[in-house]
Amino acid sequence: MYAQMVKTASNGVKSHDEMSDKERAFQGRIDADEKIEPKDWMPDDYRRTLIRQIGQHAHSEIVGQLPEGNWITRAPTLERKAILIAKVQDEAGHGLYLYCAAETLGVSRDELIEELLAGRMKYSSIFNYPTLNWSDMGAVGWLVDGAAIMNQVPLQRTSYGPYSRAMVRVCREESFHQRQGFAIMMKMATGVAAQKAMAQDSLNRFWYPSLMMFGPPDADSVHSEQSMAWKIKINTNDELRQKFVDQTIPQIEYLGLECPDKTITWNDEKGGYDYAQPDWNEFFDVIKGNGPCNKERLAARVKAWEDGEWVRDGLLAHAKKKAARVAAE
Amino acid sequence: MTRDEALFEFLLRLGDNTVVLSHRVSEWIGHSPVLEEDIALANTALDLIGQTRFWLGLAGEVEGKGRTADNLAYLRDAWDYRNLLLVERPNGDFGKTMMRQFLFDAWQSLMLGKLLTSSDPRVAEIAAKASKEVAYHLERSADTIVGLGDGTEDSHNRMQAALDDLWDYTGEMFISDEVDEVLSTAGIAPNAASLKEEWEELVGRILKDATLTIPDSSYAHKGGKSGVHTEHLGFILADMQFLQRAYPGASW
């Protein structure tokens, strides 16, 4: 999930009686599965919450270029390199659609980027973990994109039209990413001993951080109710996490790897696996900025933005000169 | 030098240019000045990798020793690389990266244009695919050179500095040797020197629009085409070839 712990901009769900006429009509449209479009009336809190959520999602795509970018120059074959570059390029493209979707809510891309660089907006906790061996390119596609898809597939039905349509495009590409990630894992898990060791090492490091991507357990998740009523959030954190575990355990077995959670057991009654919770203290540490790569990730983005200022200014100055010349003719 | 020996060398030159430049350009991904540039730089790097697979694949075929494009890219040391020194120059700032790209794109587009009518149909076929991509690369790099050259005072100065720094690495493109003689006689590829005039005209026109001044120097650093490189190539290969070298025989 690329948007975690998005704070809903309201104090709980209003009852039907507490709503104004406009709010009642708005909720009625959502309940009837109508899409809300940019020019439609919407409650300020709906708008603010969506800006936070879409913005965080966009930032995750942008920062998410970095852990994979880390291996582009070291990709082991020309084909793997081409696939990895194409994938990271897709992430940048997803960032672009999402910033555009956010712009329809009245916030500019530059404003959102400033919020990110100042540390006032977050991106997904997962990108604060390092990519230490080539198999991590497999694990990121398989587990990280796999977890993201769990969240994004239902978001194709989200109530806000531009976000929903962006998700349709994103999901199409993400499922390709997940498949290429699994293809790398297959190669590694069936390769020479060192490759198999890399595959196991990746799984060991990415398993719990992937579970954290869905956000804290429902019992501790304070922001969900209103967002679910607005259909900005479709499933609860625990529902999605369970679905992810149930999908992934057979894949781990297929790869011949060992799940780092030794307590995993099939629970017939619930029709899913019982699994151990990740260390939520670690999660909150990462969210607060103390993950292994938080400082480096943000510093890389700040550097790209600051180093690029002269380029943006130069191109803008040229565009103005050109427009002035055309006007003078 | 036989025709096939010359062709092998020439294909390495083409494929090594694209693989090394792709490597350099790909270093930017995630770090560029604006999101659209991240996408465009990735696109350029990706096109160049695709071209590498064709050129080096054909090189292996012509050599006839069973080497694949990957074998050639990942298992040759620097002295066997045949790329122009220009493409291995460090990225520097965004302006320098784009200046390097522009100087190369202008040359590559002319070279591919000539190769479209190569007497070797395999060469002509690859050139036809690549020239479409390169036409776009050139359009974009030329626009960027003009935009930044004729932008602010700061961007102008940076672009002039980039041009001054890279200019002495352009002459190598037009130095002909035995490879060129053999291949031009066979109608497979143009003589390197024959591209010079058109390149100067094209580059001169864009640089004029960019309000940049061509350095008053005709010195040419050379050696790349015969395997004598700058200190930078060794590091590029150390990075690129790490996994193939550390785990020989593994399949990825």
Image (cartoon, grey):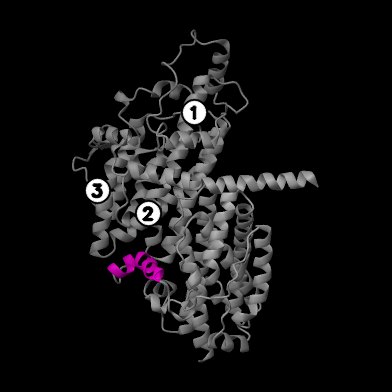
Find the magenta span and give its range.
B231-246
Q: Where is residue B159 in the image (x, y as percent from the top left)?
A: 57, 57
Residue B102 higher or lower than A127, as above or below: below
Give the residue pinned by disc 2.
A70
Which residue is painted at 63% across and 83% down in the image? Answer: B119
Q: Quadrant of the C terminus of chain B?
A: bottom left
Let me know if marks 2 and 1 both belong to one chain: yes
Q: Residue A204 carries which label?
A: 3
Q: Are marks 3 and 2 in contact (CB under 8 Å)?
A: no
Q: Which comes before the other along the chain, label 2 or label 1?
A: 1
Q: Where is residue B144 in the image (x, y as percent from the top left)?
A: 60, 55
Q: Residue A313 falls in which quadrant of the image?
A: top right
> In the image, what residue occupies the spot 52% across and 21% down?
A31
* A27 and A140: which is toward the camera: A140
Residue A183 within the segment the image draws in magenta = no
Is residue A165 among what the camera can see?
no
Q: Residue furthest right?
A: A329
Q: What residue type is labelled 1?
A: Leu
- The residue nearer to you, when weighing A310 against A251, is A310
Foreground pick, A286 / A76:
A286
Disc marking residue B51: none
Q: Residue B240: within the magenta?
A: yes
From the image, tell me which residue sits under label 1: A50
User: As shown in the figure, which amino acid type bears the numbered disc 2?
Assistant: Asn
Q: Can residue B92 be seen in this view?
A: yes
In three-dimensional space, the C-alpha distance between marks 3 and 1, rounded to whole angstroms, equals: 34 Å
Q: Which amino acid does label 3 sit on?
A: Asn
Point out the tag, 3 or 1, that comes first from the N-terminus.
1
Q: For mark 2, give the secondary structure.
A: loop
The reply, left or right, for residue B2 in relation to residue B147 is left
**Dominant secondary structure of the magenta stretch?**
helix
Q: Which residue is drawn at 45% across and 50% down?
A: B31
